[in-house]
Image: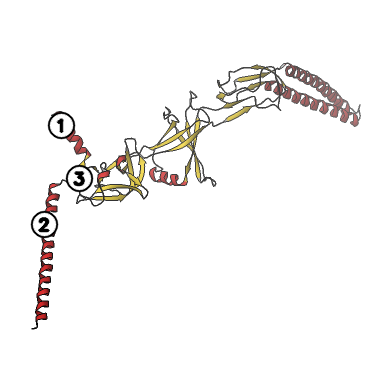
């Protein structure tokens, strides 16, 4: 072996020794770090999070819609005869009864017309009585051949004309009496009367504007529209056999003290708006609901149903959608997309999809957790019990 070969061999052996030493150092360092990290992990406690275990709950399905109060009937009062307005027998805004007198048109001329028509009837009846007597005598004379047939025909025609004149006079009397009746304008129904547009002394008649308006206030309707999607939800939540509570909530949040009933559901959807019109009728003896008033109709089923319900604070939302954090059987965090349903009064919410009975849902501590992270769930009912024990001690 040459001197050069011996030098190369020595140099190569030295390199092998250096590489082996570095590899051994890395291996020892890795196992040392792993042991250190394991010891550190054993010393650090898992992140505690508040949670609840999901259980089915019986709820009463409820939904609400914007509604407008509308009168069942609304009538504008008009004069049927012409004359000067003599009296106004109400205060604007009064509750009025059916057939209650409201306006009086000066009746003097119409009373005179009635008396004239009555006189004409009496005159026509007297003439008809005389014509009848003449006709009877003519018939007797015709039987004895003392008068011609033409005289008989003439007497009969005179009598029939007199009878027609009586009927005509009676018709004129009926019209005169009806015109006199029209001088008193009455309410067509029970309701509330609005502002009068004419003052006493003004000339009014059939061509005049509406004198005042009467609206029926008891009962009164709350009208609302339901979209096609909401209609499908209603059909799912409210069965046809269900009894439904109907409330009207005013714009200030107060609930009208009397319950309503659904009294009308349109037969077709509005093509332009794709909505279905529904009406609910409410008793309104005191007139507290006013036509044109806005609020909300709240429909609540009186038949309980079993639903998945969780605290509202457990539901999170971002640009990707609505979700909750669950704790799985290995105490690891899982993010689950959910479909949110009806919000309940006690800060709870119905979950239509995404969560099932037995799931553990995180309710607090979201900023400290992430998917697949190990956590320690602390159930809210256990926290409440611990607090109660501490208070007792």
Q: Quadrant of residue 26?
A: bottom left
Say which label, 2 or 3, has the lower sequence index. 2
Front tag of 1 and 3: 3
**Where residue 5 appears, x then y in whole percent?**
11, 80
Separation of marks 1 and 3 at Cα, in angstroms = 23 Å
Q: Quadrant of residue 312?
A: top left
Say which label, 1 or 3, has the lower sequence index. 3
Dot 2 lies on which element?
Answer: helix
Dot 2 crowding, Cα within 10 Å, few <14, some 14–19, many 20+? few
In this view, the residue farthest toward the bottom is 1
- Would you name the residue on which mark 2 appears? 32
Dot 1 lies on which element?
Answer: helix
In this view, the residue farthest toward the front is 3
In the rendered structure, the answer to whether residue 37 lies left or right of residue 300 reads left
Which of the two residues, 332 or 388, is positioned nearer the viewer here? 332
| Total number of numbered discs in the rendering | 3
- Would you name the residue on which mark 1 appears? 390
Q: Is residue 112 above or below residue 368?
A: above
In the rendered structure, the answer to whether residue 318 lies left or right of residue 283 reads left
- At x 30% / y 40%, what residue is drawn? 313
Dot 3 crowding, Cα within 10 Å, few <14, some 14–19, many 20+? few
Separation of marks 2 and 3 at Cα, in angstroms = 26 Å
- At x 12% / y 59%, what residue is drawn? 29
In the rendered structure, the answer to whether residue 248 lies left or right of residue 84 reads left
Q: In this view, does 362 lie above or below 161?
A: below
- At x 84% / y 23%, what residue is drawn? 131
In the rendered structure, the answer to whether residue 77 lies left or right of residue 307 reads right
- Would you name the residue on which mark 3 appears? 47
**Where residue 130 appears, x then y in whole percent?**
83, 21
Front tag of 2 and 1: 2
Which of the two residues, 347 or 78, is positioned nearer the viewer here? 347
Separation of marks 2 and 1 at Cα, in angstroms = 44 Å
């Amino acid at each position: 072996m040459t001197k050069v070969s011996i030098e190369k061999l020595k140099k190569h052996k030295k390199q092998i020794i250096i590489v082996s030493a570095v590899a051994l150092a890395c291996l020892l360092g890795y196992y040392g770090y792993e042991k250190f990290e394991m010891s550190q992990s054993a010393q650090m406690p898992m992140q505690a999070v508040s949670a609840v275990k999901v259980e089915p709950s019986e709820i009463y399905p409820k939904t609400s819609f914007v509604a407008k109060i509308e009168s069942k009937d609304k009538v504008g009062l008009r004069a049927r005869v012409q004359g000067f307005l003599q009296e106004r027998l109400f205060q604007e805004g009064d509750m009025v009864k059916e057939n209650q007198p409201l306006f009086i048109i000066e009746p003097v001329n119409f009373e005179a017309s009635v008396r004239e028509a009555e006189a004409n009837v009496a005159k026509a009846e007297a003439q008809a009585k005389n014509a009848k007597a003449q006709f009877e005598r003519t018939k007797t004379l015709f039987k004895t051949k003392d008068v011609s047939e033409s005289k008989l025909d003439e007497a009969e025609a005179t009598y029939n004309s007199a009878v027609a004149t009586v009927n005509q006079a009676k018709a004129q009397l009926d019209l005169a009496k009806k015109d006199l009746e029209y001088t008193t304008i009455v309410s067509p129904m029970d309701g509330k009367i609005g502002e009068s547009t004419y003052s006493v002394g003004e000339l009014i008649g059939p061509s005049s504007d509406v004198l005042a308006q009467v609206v029926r206030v008891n009962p009164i309707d709350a009208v609302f529209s339901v979209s096609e999607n909401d209609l499908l939800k209603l059909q799912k939540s409210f069965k046809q056999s269900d009894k439904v509570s109907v409330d009207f909530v005013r714009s200030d949040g107060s609930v009208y003290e009397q319950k309503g009933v659904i009294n009308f559901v349109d037969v077709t959807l509005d093509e332009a708006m794709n909505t279905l019109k529904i009406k609910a009728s409410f008793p309104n003896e005191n007139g507290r609901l006013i036509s044109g008033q806005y609020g909300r109709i709240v429909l609540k089923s009186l038949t309980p149903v079993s639903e998945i319900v969780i605290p509202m604070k457990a539901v999170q939302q971002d640009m990707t959608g609505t979700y909750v954090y669950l704790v799985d059987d290995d105490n690891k965090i899982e993010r689950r997309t959910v479909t949110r349903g009806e919000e309940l009064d006690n800060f709870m919410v119905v979950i239509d999809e995404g969560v099932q009975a037995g799931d553990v849902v995180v309710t607090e501590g979201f900023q400290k957790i992430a998917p697949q992270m190990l956590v320690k769930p602390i159930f809210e009912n256990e926290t409440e019990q611990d607090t109660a024990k501490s208070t007792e001690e």
